[in-house]
């Protein structure tokens, strides 16, 4: 947790585990392996992988998730930034110089017979 890395968080796999926020992601990986049956019953929040909720409650969690706003704001910022870049973009592309002269080539080819 960026606000308080020493804050204790309850493990979703074992309610008796209390882990410091800074160690929580590592604990989740370890505990998932230790409790595979509990892991099958939990779903991961699409906005924050630290949020593990019962599968039946996932849709309710998604509508209320506090991290949802951060993701939505990032999407808005990225899309508006992209639109601004598109509007302000000026192409600096230039065609490379051309060494071909089709008229000269066609005159040269007309003097020599075509052989198959």
Image: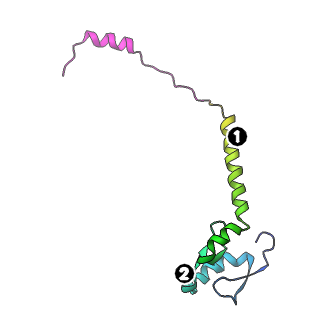
Q: Note whether 22 is above or below 63 in the view shown.
A: below
At 70% from the left and 63% from the top, the residue drawn is 68
> Which quadrant would the C terminus be assigned to in this image?
top left
Spot occupied by residue 67 in the image (x, y as percentages of width and height): 72, 65
Residue that badge 2 annotates: 40
Which sits in the foreground, 41 or 12? 41
Q: Which mark is residue 84?
A: 1
Q: Position of residue 6 (x, y in %)?
A: 79, 78
Badge 1 crowding class, 10 Å Cα cut-off, few under 14, some 14 to 19, many 20 or more, is: few
Location of residue 1 with respect to 71 vertically, above or below: below
Q: In the rendered structure, which segment of residues is drawn in magenta?
A: 92-116
Q: Is residue 10 left or right of residue 3?
A: left
Q: Measure the C-alpha gap from mark 2 to mark 1.
A: 44 Å
- State the image coordinates of residue 115 (x, y, percent, origin top left): 19, 19
Q: Which mark is residue 102?
A: none
The structure residue drawn at horizontal position 21% and vertical position 13%, both measured from the top left corner, is 113
Q: Is residue 105 left or right of residue 34?
A: left
Disc nearer the start of the sequence (2/1): 2
Q: Residue at x 59, y 75 (%)?
A: 43
Instruction: Give percent across and percent down for residue 81.
Output: 70, 45
**How many numbered marks are there?**
2
**Location of residue 56 by image quarter:** bottom right
In the image, residue 113 lies in the stretch drawn in magenta: yes
């Amino acid at each position: 947790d960026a606000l308080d890395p020493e804050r204790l968080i309850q493990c979703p796999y074992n309610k008796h585990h209390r882990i410091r926020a800074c160690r929580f992601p590592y604990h989740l990986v370890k505990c998932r392996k230790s409790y595979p049956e509990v892991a099958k019953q939990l779903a991961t929040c699409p906005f924050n992988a630290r949020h593990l909720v019962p599968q039946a409650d996932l849709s309710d969690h998604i509508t209320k998730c506090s991290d949802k706003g951060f993701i939505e704001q990032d999407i808005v910022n990225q899309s508006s930034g992209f639109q601004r870049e598109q509007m302000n973009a000026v192409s600096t592309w230039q065609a490379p110089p051309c060494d071909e002269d089709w008229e000269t080539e066609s005159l040269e080819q007309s003097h020599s017979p075509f052989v198959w």
